[in-house]
Amino acid sequence: MQRNSLEKILIGITFLSLMASLYAIFFYAPLEATMGLVQKVWYFHLASAWVTFLAYAVVFVAGILYLSRKKRCFDILGYSSAGIGVVFNTLVLVTGSIWAKPIWGTWWTWDSRLSTTLILWLMYIAYLMLRTSSGEDSKGARLAAVFGIVAFIDVPIVYMSIRWWRTIHPLVFKSKGTEVDPAMLTTLLISLVAFTLLYLCLLRQRIALEHLKDELERVKEKIRR
C-alpha cells in the first residue's frame, strides 16, 4: 500500500514538473533572437539527450553488477533502462532533425555529433535485440551485459565529438561560462528535472512489467508440472 502511494506521488510530481516545463518553454523562456520559435525544440532535444545518457549509464552499471553478482534484478534493470534509453535516443534524433531543417537547411548531415548519436542508437537497438532473443537464458544475459558495457563507450564520444572534431553542431556551454539567457537556462533546468522524473517513472513501470513476466513464467512452469 505504501509502495503504491509512493508511486502515485512520483507520478503526480512528474506530471506537475512536465506541465511546469511546458509552461516555461512556451511562455516563460524568451524567443531566441536568431532562430526564433524553432529554438524551443532545444529544450526537448537537450533534455532527451540527458535522459539518453542517464539511461545508458544505468545499463552500464547494471551490466557490471550483473556480471559480478549474477542477480536477475540487475539484468532486468539494464534491459528496462536500455529500452527507455532507445526511446529518448530516438527523440534526440527526431528533435535534432526538426531543429536542423530551418537552421542548416537539411534534415540530416553526417556531422560528427549526429553520426556518433546515430551509432549509439543502433548499438542499443542491437542490445535490445540480443537481450530479447536470449529470453531467460543466463548466458544470453551475460552476453547482453558485456555488450551494454562496451556500447557505453560511445556515450563520452558523443559528448566530446563537437570538441574533438570539426562540426557545425553548436557548443552551447563553453569552458569559460555560458552564453545562455538566464530565463532560458532556468527553463532548461526545469526540463531536465521533468524528463529525469519521467525516466524514473517509466523505469519503475518497465521493471514492474518484467517482474510480472517472470511471475507469469513461474506460474506456467507450475501448471506444466
Image (spheres, rainbow, N blue to C red):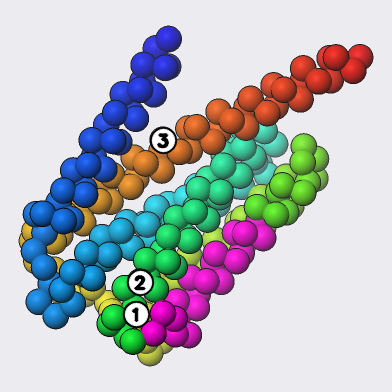
Q: Quadrant of residue 30?
A: bottom left
Give the farthest residue toward the top: 1
What residue is drawn where x is 45% and y is 38%?
A: 202
Would you name the residue on which mark 1 appears? 101
Q: Are marks 2 and 1 in contact (CB under 8 Å)?
A: yes
Magenta-colored span = 106-127
Q: Secondary structure at mark 3?
A: helix
**Could you tell me which quadrant the C terminus lies in?**
top right
Q: Position of residue 199 (x, y in %)?
A: 41, 43
Q: Secondary structure at mark 1?
A: helix
Mark 3 or 2: the one toward you: 2
Query: 62 or 107, which is in the foreground?
Result: 107
Would you name the residue on which mark 2 appears? 98
Query: 175 or 17, which is in the foreground?
Result: 17
The residue under label 3 is which amino acid type? Cys
Q: Position of residue 125 (x, y in %)?
A: 62, 59
What residue is drawn where x is 22% and y is 64%?
A: 40
Measure how far apart labels 1 and 3 are at the Cα level.
32 Å
Would you name the residue on which mark 3 appears? 201
